[in-house]
Image: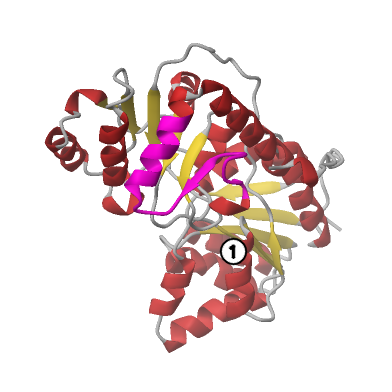
Amino acid sequence: MRNKRLIMLGVPPETRGSVAAVVGTYRAHGLFKRWPIDYFDAPLPAARHVLAAAASGMRLAVHAHLSVQGFWRDAALVGAALTMRCPVLIQLHGRGFERFYDECEGLKRALVRTMLERAAGVLVPTELLKHWARATARQADVTCLPNPVAVEPLAKDPARPNLVLFLGHMAPDKGVFDLLEALAAVSVDVPDLRLVCAGDGDRVAVARYAERLGIAELVKFTGWVGPSGKRALFEAAAVLAAPSYDAALPMSMLEAMAAGVPVAAAAVGGIPEVIVDGVSGMLVAPGDSASLAKALKKMLLDRAHAARIGAAGRETVRLRHAPERALPRLEEIYARLGVQPIVAPAPAAKADLRKAA
């Protein structure tokens, strides 16, 4: 009997967001070489492949990466696979599932519950999302699987400038205007302060607000940056600011922590699951620009404190999110779906989570 193949639905590699980042890490760390995976970045071709393969007698399992954006589009593959009685693994990404579900009407709510409960497993990146999934679909088999983040050797410059980094979409709900207010307050005591905004969004509005606050010359815009550009920014940044009003567990924040960059973040979503305030990062209430300014000032002026926080944050990511820890857990799930590896997976690295801050 032929080995069961695994159909994975994701997004094009150039797409921004956690799905592309997670799949890229899977690929970079050998998952696609160890397992018989056919990757699709669009749901309709994947659904057609599932129906044709199942009709020909090929044994399949499906791993579908789903986010709120495009949820119903991608549900075409999940529906096709469930119809053909293929085991389906659903991996949820990003924020907004609770609001998305609350805004669904009765039939759509029932479809969401049915998909989650009929899936062979549901993977989520945070305990908060795990709680939502279990409360929404009581019969669902939900597992918290941390998104993998590579922890590369450090190339640190101990004399890095007073550079604050913002990565992401520039919009009010991302807290970028609160960050500008905090920056204006900090600039009184840190005259060589700079802010780099790397991402898309309303750059004009951000620039105008910076001008109103008298800090226009402190703010630089790079546009969206790829992996190499992001690494360069991490090597230069003194602190990453993540003041969003609503977030799941931002990949950019985890990547910064993995690079040893201390983080000041809003205590929303799954962020408090990985950051202990004052130990592995600094947490503030969303919208509290005064507390954000205090956190930034502390890490910019007390570099020894910032270094301790950066080191603790890096260790937290290493213990919880490093690919050698996260991927073996996924591969165990693949084996339970009846998929056989092409090459024997490496054993999981043991982690003492008591050391994770």
Residue 158 image position (x, y, % from top left): 54, 13
Q: Is residue 320 magenta?
A: no
Residue 173 image position (x, y, % from top left): 32, 54
Going by the picture, which residue comes out furthest to the front?
Answer: 189
- The residue under label 1 is which amino acid type? Leu
Residue 103 image position (x, y, % from top left): 38, 78
Q: Which residues are magenta?
A: 274-298
Kindly identify the residue that appears in the image at 59 percent across and 64 percent down.
128
Nearest the camera: 290 or 238? 290
Determine whether the residue tagged by mark 1 lies in a helix, strand or loop: helix
Kindly identify the residue that appears in the image at 21 percent across and 40 percent down.
206
Kindly identify the residue that appears in the image at 77 percent across and 55 percent down.
334
Nearest the camera: 91 or 250? 250
Position of 59 with respect to 38 (left or right) is right
**In the figure, 143 relative to 179: above or below?**
below
Position of 238 with respect to 181 (left or right) is right
Residue occupied by mark 1: 128
Q: Quadrant of the N terminus?
A: bottom right
Position of 44 with respect to 154 (left or right) is left
Which image quadrant is residue 254 in?
top right
Q: Quadrant of the C terminus?
A: top right
Nearest the camera: 316 or 326? 316
**In the figure, 175 relative to 200: above or below?**
below
Which image quadrant is residue 187 in?
top left
Residue 312 visible in the snapshot: yes
